[in-house]
C-alpha cells in the first residue's frame, strides 16, 4: 500500500513510500502513477500496473523507496495546449536502490543507494534547449513507481546518513535552494538573506544561508510557520498578510541596508517588493512563480542598486 507522509520540517514535502517486496527476486510487473487525461479538465493521477521495465544501454533499474512531490508536479495536472501528457509517469524526485544495470554503465553498481536528478542528461556546462527538454516527470517519464528505469546520467549517490525520504527532497528543492544561495552567490557571514515562504526550496535556502552565518529574514502568511522558521535558523519573520508592503519592514529591520540575497518564489506578485528590498550590489534569485511568471520588474530599482 502507498503511504503518505510529511517531512517534519514545516510539513511541506509530500512523500510516497512504496511497499517493498519481502524477497530479493524482482517481480514481473510494477505499479506506477501516470497522468490520465480528463476531457476539458486537464489531467489526474492514475495508478496502473505495467510490465517491469528493463534497463537499456547506459541505464539502471531503480527500486524506489521514496518520492518527493514538488509544485511543478501539480502544475502538470492543468490543461496544456499543444502537448499531450497522457500516460506520462509523474514526479521527478526519488531515492532508492539500483537493482538492475544495463550494458555500458560504468559509474554505479548493483545495490547502490541513489537519488534521481531533475534533468536526465545535464552533467556539465550551461543550460540549453536540449538539456532542459530532459526534465523527469515532464516531458520525460518520471519516478513515481515501485521500479523505474533511469539513465546513468540521471542519478546521483544518496549521501550517507540520509534516509530515502530525506534524500528524495534533494534533486529539486535542495539543489535549487543551494544554487540560489551558497552555490552561486557566495554568501558571507553577516549578509542579509531574505527567503519568501516556507515551501521546500525556501526551507532549504533558509538553512543553507543560516549555516553560512547569514542573517535570514523569512516572509509568510502564517505566524505559526514564522515561529517554526525562527526555530530552525531564521532571525526575523514578516507576515505579508498583515504587512503587505513588506519591503519597508525589511529596510527597517536592516537599518536601511536591505537584503544582500533574495530568494523569490512568488513571481508576479512579489517581484516589485523584492526589488525594493534589495541591497546595493545585491542578488535577486528568481526560482519560482507561484503567483505567475508574467510579472514586471521596475527597471529603476535594479539600475539604481547595481
Image (cartoon, rainbow, N blue to C red):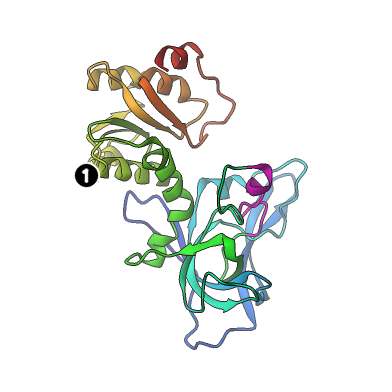
- Identified at 29% across, 22% down, the residue is 250
User: Residue 102 location in percent, x, y?
Assistant: 63, 76
User: Residue 58 location in percent, x, y?
Assistant: 64, 69
Instruction: Identify the image quadrant of residue 136.
Output: bottom right
Q: Is residue 266 above or below residue 92?
A: above
On-image quarter of the C terminus:
top left
The magenta span reads: 128-141
Q: Seen from this angle, which residue lies furthest right?
A: 82
Q: Secondary structure at mark 1?
A: helix
Q: Is residue 34 above or below residue 229?
A: below
- Identified at 38% across, 41% down, the residue is 202
**Residue 87 visible to the viewer:** yes
User: Residue 29 location in percent, x, y?
Assistant: 64, 79
Instruction: Identify the image quadrant of residue 195.
Output: top left
Pointer 1 residue = 231
In the image shown, does 158 or 63 lie closer to the viewer? 158
Q: Is residue 46 left or right of residue 296?
A: right
Number of labels in the image equals 1
In the image shown, does 292 or 252 lie closer to the viewer? 252
In the image shown, does 11 or 280 lie closer to the viewer? 280
Q: Is residue 155 left or right of residue 243?
A: right
- Identified at 65% across, 44% down, the residue is 78
Instruction: Identify the image quadrant of residue 294.
Output: top right
User: Residue 237 location in percent, x, y?
Assistant: 27, 32
Local crowd size for mark 1, using a 10 Å CA cut-off: few (<14), some (14–19), many (≥20): few
SS majority, magenta: loop
Amino acid at each position: 500500500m502507498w503511504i503518505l507522509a510529511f517531512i517534519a520540517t514545516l510539513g511541506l514535502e509530500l512523500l510516497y513510500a512504496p511497499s517493498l517486496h519481502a524477497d530479493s527476486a524482482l517481480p514481473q510487473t510494477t505499479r506506477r502513477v501516470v497522468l490520465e487525461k480528463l476531457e476539458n479538465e486537464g489531467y489526474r493521477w492514475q495508478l496502473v500496473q505495467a510490465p517491469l521495465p528493463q534497463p537499456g544501454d547506459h541505464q539502471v533499474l531503480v527500486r524506489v523507496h521514496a518520492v518527493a512531490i514538488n509544485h511543478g508536479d501539480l502544475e502538470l495536472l492543468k490543461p496544456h495546449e499543444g502537448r499531450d501528457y497522457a500516460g506520462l509517469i509523474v514526479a521527478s524526485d526519488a531515492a532508492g536502490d539500483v537493482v538492475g544495470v544495463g550494458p555500458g554503465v560504468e559509474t554505479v553498481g548493483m545495490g547502490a543507494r541513489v537519488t534521481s536528478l531533475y534533468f536526465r542528461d545535464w552533467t556539465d556546462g550551461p543550460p540549453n534547449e536540449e538539456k532542459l527538454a530532459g526534465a523527469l516527470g515532464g516531458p520525460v517519464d518520471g519516478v513515481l513507481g515501485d521500479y523505474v528505469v533511469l539513465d546513468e546520467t540521471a542519478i546521483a549517490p544518496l549521501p550517507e546518513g540520509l534516509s530515502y525520504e530525506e534524500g528524495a527532497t534533494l534533486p529539486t528543492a535542495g539543489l535549487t535552494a543551494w544554487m540560489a544561495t551558497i552555490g552561486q552567490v557566495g554568501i558571507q557571514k553577516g549578509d542579509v538573506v531574505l527567503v519568501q515562504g516556507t515551501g521546500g526550496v525556501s526551507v532549504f535556502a533558509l538553512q543553507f544561508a543560516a549555516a553560512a552565518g547569514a542573517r535570514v529574514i523569512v516572509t509568510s502568511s502564517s505566524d505559526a510557520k514564522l515561529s517554526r522558521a525562527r526555530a530552525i535558523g531564521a532571525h526575523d519573520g514578516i507576515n505579508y498578510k498583515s504587512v503587505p508592503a513588506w519591503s519597508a519592514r525589511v529596510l527597517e529591520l536592516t537599518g536601511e541596508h536591505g537584503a544582500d540575497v533574495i530568494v523569490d518564489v512568488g513571481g508576479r506578485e512579489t517581484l516589485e517588493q523584492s526589488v525594493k528590498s534589495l541591497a546595493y550590489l545585491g542578488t535577486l534569485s528568481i526560482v519560482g512563480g507561484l503567483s505567475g511568471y508574467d510579472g514586471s520588474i521596475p527597471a529603476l530599482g535594479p539600475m539604481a542598486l547595481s
